[in-house]
Image (cartoon, rainbow, N blue to C red):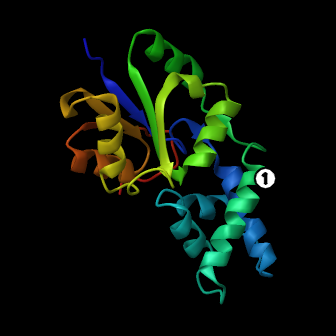
Amino acid sequence: MLRNLLIFDLDGTLIDSRRDLATAINLVRGHYGLQPLPTATVTRYVGDGIHNLVKRSLEGADVDIVEAVGLQRQFYREHMHDATVLYPGVETGLRELHRRGYTLAAASNKAAEFCERILEHFKVRDLFVHVAGDGRSPELKPRPGMFLDIMQRTGASADLAWAIGDNHTDIEAARRAGIRSVFITYGFGSVG
């Protein structure tokens, strides 16, 4: 018997990563001699992938965005565990869903390599059958490819799949993939 497939977003849904994302962005800004941005400002730029995060964070600055994205990846890799935490109840909830036989997957616009490392850091990676992210997925949310790929890999049909996220990109990707969605209100995304 097939179980429901639950596809979780990462930032703002499973983890609170605002401070570490802001740290990496502000190290990039510092590299270019720019003043740091408040964490709340950087947080508003999160959700549409690293390129957009960096571009928005450096708007108006005369810098090479490709180079800046490379710097952000380097700085984030060095600081991704400094202040990031699982939201309260997430580990218990994921373990209970897994125990009850739900198929769990993660889908983030964050680099897949970083998603893997974060889930391993919090000792929950083994609960997920697949972790999708930038560099491993055919396209980023709000396009549906990430969800469709996970459904194909797990054999789940649209009527058994759910997307859980805190951003309009999650909800729109779910709509485009023809699956149901849950909007998390405690996260830092936007319903759009």
Task: Return the residue at label 1.
Answer: 78
Res 73 → quadrant? bottom right
> Hey, which quadrant is residue 36 in on the image?
bottom right
Residue 191 percent location from the top left of the image: 37, 52
* Drawn side of residue 138 relative to residue 75, left or right: left
Instruction: Residue 109: give x, y in percent of width and height.
Output: 48, 53
| Residue at figure coordinates x 74%, y 61% from the top left | 74
Identify the residue at image location x=75%, y=43%.
83
Q: In which quadrant will I find the C terminus? A: bottom left
Count of numbered tags: 1
Q: Is residue 94 above or below residue 29?
A: above
Give the SS element for disc 1: helix
Is 69 in front, or is 189? 69
Q: Is residue 149 left or right of residue 94?
A: left
> In the rendered image, is residue 23 in sight?
no
Above or below residue 103? Residue 68 is below
Sort mark 1 into few (<14), some (14-19) or many (20+) by Cα contacts within 10 Å.
few
Q: Nearer the viewer, residue 179 or 168?
A: 179
Quarter of the figure with the N terminus: top left
Q: Amino acid at mark 1?
A: Glu
Residue found 21% across the figure and 34% down from its top = 158
Which residue is drawn at the image coordinates 58% and 28% (left, top)? 125
Q: Is residue 133 visible?
A: yes
Question: In the rendered image, which quarter is residue 35 located in?
Answer: bottom right
Instruction: Tell which of 156 and 191 is nearer to you.
Output: 156
- Residue 188 image position (x, y, % from top left): 52, 49
Give the x, y percent position of residue 135: 51, 55
